[in-house]
Image: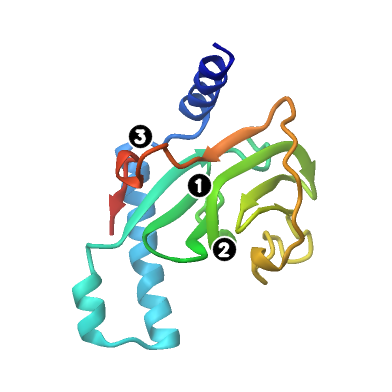
């Protein structure tokens, strides 16, 4: 019985706070990701054939959550089609689509803590163990040096914590993905 109640609370937390359903938002994020992909190809190079083949096949899961208490939606973008052994890539975008976090080796769950440091919620991100990720005031972003380099922590649930993304018990296919 306790397990059912816990599962129900987790589902309600996710449903109430973070699922992106608005078609306008999906389109806005998709267009942003397409432009970003073009910029990355120009910067780092890539085979034109590969890029043409991948266009429209890249997948992401989108969650909306206010991470800085400005009453505006921030976006957690989880890229779920080209994950390696260590995890997937993810982005955090503010309400103006400015990148506030660019992560690799992200696993689930990803949790926004109630605790705020430097104006933004502390994140607990799984990356071969749970890591605490704190917003960098000087860079105005979460650290980009790689969450796998951060020390392990033991997650302690506190009132006000929100699950941003959590893998379903069976497969990623159960989660709504969008293509770009």
Instruction: Give me the residue at 51% from left, 49% from top.
Output: 76
State the residue in front, 178 or 126: 126
Residue named by callout 2: 103
Q: Is residue 135 left or right of residue 44?
A: right
- Label 2 CA crowd tier, 10 Å (few <14, some 14–19, many 20+): some
Instruction: Give me the residue at 56% from left, 64% from top.
Output: 102
Can residue 167 be seen in this snapshot? yes
Report how many numbered discs are placed on residues in the image: 3
Marker disc for residue 31: none
Q: Position of residue 58 (x, y in %)?
A: 30, 62
Disc on the earlier residue, 3 or 1: 3
Residue named by callout 3: 21
Instruction: Give me the residue at 75% from left, 45% from top.
Output: 154
- Label 1 CA crowd tier, 10 Å (few <14, some 14–19, many 20+): many
Instruction: Give me the residue at 31% from left, 39% from top.
Output: 174
Disc on the earlier residue, 2 or 1: 1
Q: Position of residue 110 (x, y in %)?
A: 58, 45
Marker disc for residue 75: 1
Can residue 72 be seen in this snapshot? no
Q: Position of residue 86 (x, y in %)?
A: 52, 65
């Amino acid at each position: 019985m306790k397990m059912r109640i816990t599962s129900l609370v987790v589902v309600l937390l996710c449903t109430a706070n973070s699922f992106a359903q608005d078609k306008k938002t999906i389109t806005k994020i998709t267009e942003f990701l397409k432009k970003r992909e073009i910029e990355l190809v120009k910067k780092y190079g890539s085979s034109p054939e590969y890029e043409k083949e991948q266009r429209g096949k890249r997948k992401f899961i989108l969650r909306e959550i206010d991470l800085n208490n400005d009453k505006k939606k921030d976006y957690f973008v989880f890229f779920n089609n080209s994950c390696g052994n260590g995890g997937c890539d993810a982005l955090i975008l503010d309400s103006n689509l400015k990148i506030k976090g660019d992560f690799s080796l992200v696993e689930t769950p990803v949790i926004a803590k109630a605790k705020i440091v430097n104006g933004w919620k502390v994140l607990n991100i799984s990356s071969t163990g749970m890591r605490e990720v704190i917003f960098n005031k000087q860079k105005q972003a979460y650290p980009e040096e790689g969450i796998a380099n951060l020390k392990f922590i033991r997650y302690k649930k506190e009132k006000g914590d929100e699950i941003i993304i959590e893998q379903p018990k069976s497969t990623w296919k159960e989660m709504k993905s969008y293509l770009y």
